[in-house]
Amino acid sequence: MSSLKPVLVVAGIGAGGGTGGATARAFAKLGYSIALIARGTDSLKSLENELQNSGAEATSFPIPSYEHSSIKSAFESVRARYTSTEYSIRAALYNAGHGVWKPFLDITPEDVKIITETNIEGSFAFAHEVLSDFKQNEIDTTNGKRGILIFTGATASIRGNTTTSAFAAGKFALRALSQSLAKEFGKQNIHVAHAIVDGGISTPLSRSRRNDSEWDQNEDIRLSPEAIAASYVYLASQERSAWTWELDLRPAHEKW
Amino acid sequence: MSSLKPVLVVAGIGAGGGTGGATARAFAKLGYSIALIARGTDSLKSLENELQNSGAEATSFPIPSYEHSSIKSAFESVRARYTSTEYSIRAALYNAGHGVWKPFLDITPEDVKIITETNIEGSFAFAHEVLSDFKQNEIDTTNGKRGILIFTGATASIRGNTTTSAFAAGKFALRALSQSLAKEFGKQNIHVAHAIVDGGISTPLSRSRRNDSEWDQNEDIRLSPEAIAASYVYLASQERSAWTWELDLRPAHEKW
Amino acid sequence: MSSLKPVLVVAGIGAGGGTGGATARAFAKLGYSIALIARGTDSLKSLENELQNSGAEATSFPIPSYEHSSIKSAFESVRARYTSTEYSIRAALYNAGHGVWKPFLDITPEDVKIITETNIEGSFAFAHEVLSDFKQNEIDTTNGKRGILIFTGATASIRGNTTTSAFAAGKFALRALSQSLAKEFGKQNIHVAHAIVDGGISTPLSRSRRNDSEWDQNEDIRLSPEAIAASYVYLASQERSAWTWELDLRPAHEKW
Amino acid sequence: MSSLKPVLVVAGIGAGGGTGGATARAFAKLGYSIALIARGTDSLKSLENELQNSGAEATSFPIPSYEHSSIKSAFESVRARYTSTEYSIRAALYNAGHGVWKPFLDITPEDVKIITETNIEGSFAFAHEVLSDFKQNEIDTTNGKRGILIFTGATASIRGNTTTSAFAAGKFALRALSQSLAKEFGKQNIHVAHAIVDGGISTPLSRSRRNDSEWDQNEDIRLSPEAIAASYVYLASQERSAWTWELDLRPAHEKW
């Protein structure tokens, strides 16, 4: 790789204890500088501090929403912080999500708007910024990549269900985007991947919701954010002759 | 069926010579009254007149966009015109679409907005109105349906490709919605279906674009709107023990 | 269509009260002569008699198994009975199946053999004979077809599950065959289709197994063979500009 | 892991320069003893020697065909060589394949037989032996596995095409088996995975066929067996909270 320091940009970290945070930690350990884009200033700051305390370079870029203009503006700040003379954005994760599980007739226009903004408007804006930067990168000779862009999907990425009309619409759309981009940008040595997370993830939030220590302690029945992050690290390492667009991830005992 | 006159509501008729128009004509021949919701006042009026001249009851409801409020307002007009004491909305087609075929980095925020509005905001609003009405209907004893809601999909509903990131995102989302609704509302004897139109459709617009009379005259290589409409009529007739959620439609000689 | 009498060939009729039998009856009503190929001489003879009593031309061709040589030999008999100077094979249904639902380690080599024979050896042999004949037919100008070949699939055609390793392997293979053939022979105006039957079918056999008259009488929760057959008749009628390769069929209330 | 030496069993090594061989080498480097099951005594012996010369424990078990009895008998030899007091079969790769690319009507009953034998009879027998052994293993505490069974798939695993009716039938069936087993045996902490190899693999055989050194030297346009093997090593390492059933693999520049 070039002498520029590699940067990972993550969009979407929830409360910081999930997939986005774990991915930031995992890439930080590999020497990446981290840019965190998300709503929720407190969680962002807290994760930023944690990463910095672990010795990593990390900066958070709070956004009010996943609107196009917010994402674009956040990227300008990312580029100002991680200047192209010293840094090179090499990896990006679009992990933003918004869960709506409701009977269809209870779904409000606001639900539809937030699902759309999170899964389409935001992802298109994020991908636009990331890919524009990747195109300027030299190819990393170890894996043939100018950069890797990963999207976090879910069961609802491939299957609509009774209470998931809005959630699945968003996740299907995100998957379509990732497949289209994988086909278009693979030719330019940019790797685009999509992970179908098929099961419950153990996060501080899900643990407090469930309040079921057995569930949390049994790794056979729920995903850990670290294990998901490990798969993203693996995808980033895949060499150019065998890239994966899509893989599924689920706990050993999951019924599916 | 009850003594109420059945109504078909179509959203999206393009220039009137495509799938939406052909479906209106086909259902009109079966005795349905027609409600046409679309942008493009001229095309709407022209199709309305044509249907009326053929002896059908048809009314057009122009909308400025597929925004939630436009759809909701159009439905209020539909209900005022086709009152529930005399009519019963029994079939609905969401045929609105918007084509964006561009390299990803050329896609504008406006492209994303219109794709989103057409495929998600509009379809959710349309389905909300239609299903709310269907739930009030009695079950048609001939086929077990309170109503049928059909969505027009495309190749891009199941496959993203190099220039279809926006188009496929919209069409994937629409497919997710249709599958979720089929699962949720089947139990209430409401039939939801999705057609994957996999090939070029011969419409006045596509004919003038191609300017290739051979293409138009060779029914083995392009779809006719009438044939698509025939499949929608078939879906509406399927009896309750064997409903189809999804079928694909393509010309005999199509390479796929 | 030409002046030759159209013939439907059905492979697989079970006990006669299921999809194969209903399809034979439905096409007979449309004026097709019927050729029945199946194991189980009694069921065959009984269905043959029933069809003849209803005024149809029907002949049964018992086979000992779905081995290649049995199918080939049965077709020679079909051709001797329905000579090409007077008849034209225009439709064919491969409806043979064999259910194996077992934990994987309980599956025997014999189970694998019968699954393979029914779903691959037999279907390849059947399709070979049918398509060789279809290629000689003139194109039916009403629908653009030299002939239609339909395969009966199941939920297990698209999803493997805990007790369906053998059954799904067979059904996936059959689906692959149908898709390959649809692509190869569409160009020759031969229509190949595949139906995913996603639910329990009410047949004399399933009724006696379940012994649950409520299930049988509730058309919202189980498929009727006649409804499946109606979809096959529809597929046969599709005109050349919009052919369906695959559709799913399930009862209105099915959970899926 | 226990103190028993881990064994990898590979079925199908072609001429030794492809995926099977590369996987054997990769696992040997990780300390696995290797059991090679394949047709083609010379290739087997040659790979066995190569592995032994590199310091690995490797034994070849030639089989005349992928018939059930051959596979069963080979496993008895494997177990006699790698006794359960000293060894533990922990990983298995079903990599056997047979390519048939022909217009459908040119496919012979022999083609169908060999496709069936390689993809169904052999894979069911192989999985039966492997899973019976895995069930006796203790769970490896580092990744939650009693063992991992991987199947090599292809583009034709998910898409039938004009000349792939037989090949796709086999590969679809193999995929169905892998999915069914993943669902059934995940609950028993046995990991079953399926890789969709979507592109040409650079092997001595494919290189001599193409005779195109540019193709071979351009890692952006063809897969290397080593890269595929690296993905299998990764799958074997996945910890229990996030297992992958299926991933696709293709060169960066592949058109798909």
Image (cartoon, coloured by chain):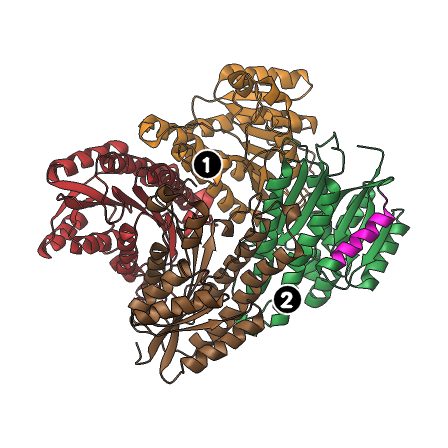
Chain colours: A green, B brown, C red, D orange
Query: Residue A113, which numbered label?
Result: 2
Q: Is residue B13 left or right of residue D27?
A: left
Q: Is residue A42 left or right of residue B107?
A: right
Residue occupying image coordinates x 52% and y 47% = B159
- Quarter of the C terminus of chain A within the rendering: bottom right
User: Marks 2 and 1, Cα distance to the nearest angstrom?
Assistant: 42 Å
- Residue under pointer 1: D171
Q: Nearer the viewer, residue B166 or D242?
A: B166
Left-right relation of D17 to B214:
right
- Asked whether residue B146 appears in the rendered view, the answer is no
Q: Give the amino acid type for the residue marked by disc 2 in the picture.
A: Lys
Q: Amino acid at mark 1?
A: Lys
Q: Which residue: 39% across, 45% down?
A: C171
Residue D170: image location, x then y, percent:
42, 35
- Reply above or below: D90 against B230: above
Q: Quadrant of residue C208?
A: bottom left
Q: Give the SS element for disc 1.
A: helix
In the rendered view, tell whether residue C196 sits above or below residue C74: below
Write down the quadrant of residue A134 in the picture. top right
- Say few, some or many: other residues with alpha carbon within 10 Å of mark 2 (under 14 / 14 to 19 / 20 or more): some
Q: Which residues are magenta?
A: A70-83
Please report, as a chain letter, where disc 1 is located.
Answer: D
